[in-house]
Structure formats: C-alpha cells, structure tokens
Amino acid sequence: MTTPYEVAVRAEAELGEGPTWDAATGRLLWIDILGCRLHTYDPATGRRTVRRTEQHIGAVKPRAGGGLVLNLRDGIGLLDPDGGFRWLHHEPVPGRRANDAAVAPDGMLWTGTMRYDEAPGGGTLSRVTGDGSVDVVLDDVAVSNGTGWSPDGRLMYYIDSPTRRVDVFDHADGRISGRRSLAEIEESAGFPDGLTVDAEGCVWVALWQGSAVRRYTPDGELDRVIELPVPLVTACAFGGVGLTDLYVTTARVGLTDPPALAGSLFVVPGAGKGLAQPPFAG
C-alpha cells in the first residue's frame, strides 16, 4: 500500500506552521514560529527561500497589492514587494505572542494570540482591517489556532486548542455569533491545531500529538484520516495547480527523540479541492 503523503520539504522546523498558497506567485508560504523564519516553496521548480524575522512569527498571508502581512509577536507587520518592512499595528504585550491567522472572504485578517505559558484567557482573536484598525472579537482564549470559513462565507470555524473542540459560528458582516461545537477531539487523538475548509465545505483539522489530519463534514462527521510519520502535526492548506494538493506543516519542539521527518513540510497530492483564499486587503 502506497503512503498518501510525500515530503515536500525536508526540514527541522522547531514549530512549522501556517501553510498558505500564494496564487499570485505560485508558491506555498509557511513559517517556523519559534525559529523566526518565513519559508517559501515553489512546487513547480522545487525552489525554496528562507527569510529570518526579527521576532517570533505566528502567520503570513499574501496582500492584495503585493507583498505579505505578518502576524508577529508585537503586532501586525507588512512586507512590501520590495522587501521593506513596516508596522501596520504595533501592540507589544509582555508574555504574549502571535499565533495562527486567516483572511476572511471580505479580505480582513483574523489574527490569534496566546501567552507563552498558554494561560487560559491570555489570548485573543481579533479582526484587522486594511488600515490597521483592530477589533478584538474573542478575549478569553488560551491558544488561538485554526480559523476558516465555509464556501458561502456564512459560517466560521475556529479552534482554541486546549478545548479539544472545533467550533462553528454564524458569520455575517465581519461579526460572529451562535458559537457551538462542530466536533470534539478525543484525548487519545491529541489536540486540534490548524484547519482549512475545502470546496465541499468539509473541515480539515491538523492534530497536535495526534500524527494525523482529519476531515470532518459540515455536519461534524469524521469521514477521512490521513496519518503522518510525526506526532506534532500543526496545520494544513490546499495549494498547487487546481488547489488539489494538501500541504501539512509539522514541528519538533519539545520532542526528546524526534523522528527524522519531524519539522518537515508534507504534501498529500490530489487530497481534495481547496477554496481560493483571498489576499489581505491591506
């Protein structure tokens, strides 16, 4: 039986995270949060780049006008197409860092934070507009992680990892309501981390300490499991031509005897059909 996954980039990322397909450049963006590194990977040529960031980086997304937006420890930063950096929103909070982020259908950036000690209530989920205005949407979060929207934009999925739940909200005009559980992850399967939503409205969830990615239907039924040879599976996203390949980031932080491929970027060719992700409107 052939394995469904391939190693796209063999790496030793401390905390690989945030795979994002940049349609404008045909590259996959991903990060090493604790290694302070921004990676790009071109599957057509195999070309890779690495850029060091000055502080821990939680997420990277393309911008509508070119360049990238970064969810950094001390706020939201912009990389311009010429490589120059500037702050869009600068708000350092001692003991807190950025974590996962996602761009909503309207082009706004939803950013998560968490305390380094993962204290309950120490993190937030915020909505950031193109001009840098920040609206804190959830202020009682421990480890803000995966965020994504249904194909019609009417539902938002969200993970606060220690809850072991994938939650779903009603979403309209940049506001969320009606929080309820879509799926609960049993203790033996690890913690839910990053997520992505496919064109059928199914939710793919990476499992930290679970060695797998799971797909849940819009009704919350588990209908597929992709097992990986590393325990710390962090996030997933569709990319490549036609958005049919599922890219998966992994980590090795805290492992006393990490497997050889821990911290690598994996790909599952032909896993499904992803949704085109809008760039940040800033």
Image: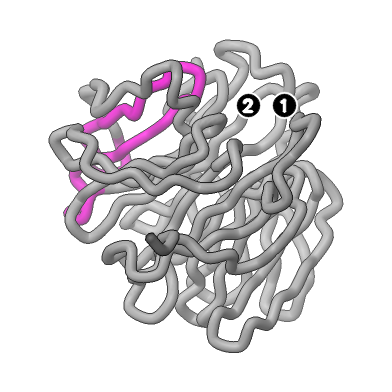
Q: Is residue 89 something one can see in this rendering?
A: no
For residue 74, what is the image quadrant? Answer: top right
Q: CA distance from mark 2 to mark 1?
A: 6 Å
Q: How many marks?
A: 2
Furthest-left residue in view? 219
Q: Is residue 105 above or below residue 40?
A: above
Residue 52 against residue 202 in the figure, above or below = below
28 to the left or right of 82: left
Where's residue 273, x and y in %? Answer: 27, 66
Q: Residues within 10 Å of mark 1 (few under 14, many from 20)?
A: some
* Amino acid carrying mark 1 in the image: Arg
Place of residue 223 in the rendered image (x, y in percent of width and height, measured from the top left): 21, 42
Q: Residue at x 62, y 17 (%)?
A: 122
Residue 163 is marked as none
> Residue lying farthest bottom?
45
Q: Which residue is label 2 attached to?
A: 114
Number of other residues with Cα within 10 Å of mark 2, as a class: few under 14, some 14 to 19, many 20 or more: many
Closest to the observer, 39 or 207: 207
Is 161 covered by the magenta stretch?
A: yes
Nearest to N terminus: mark 2 or mark 1: 1
- The residue depicted at 17 percent of the width and 40 percent of the height is 218
Q: In screen coordinates, is 148 left or right of 48?
A: left
Hey, what amino acid is under mark 2? Answer: Met
- Rendered residue at 60%/43% (across/down): 230
**Residue sitting at 22 percent across and 60 percent down?**
199
Residue 149 falls left or right of residue 122? left
Which region shows up in magenta? 150-175
Helix, strand, or loop for circle 2? Answer: strand
Between 235 and 83, the one lying in front of the other is: 235
Residue beneath disc 1? 96
Q: Position of residue 212 (x, y in %)?
A: 45, 41
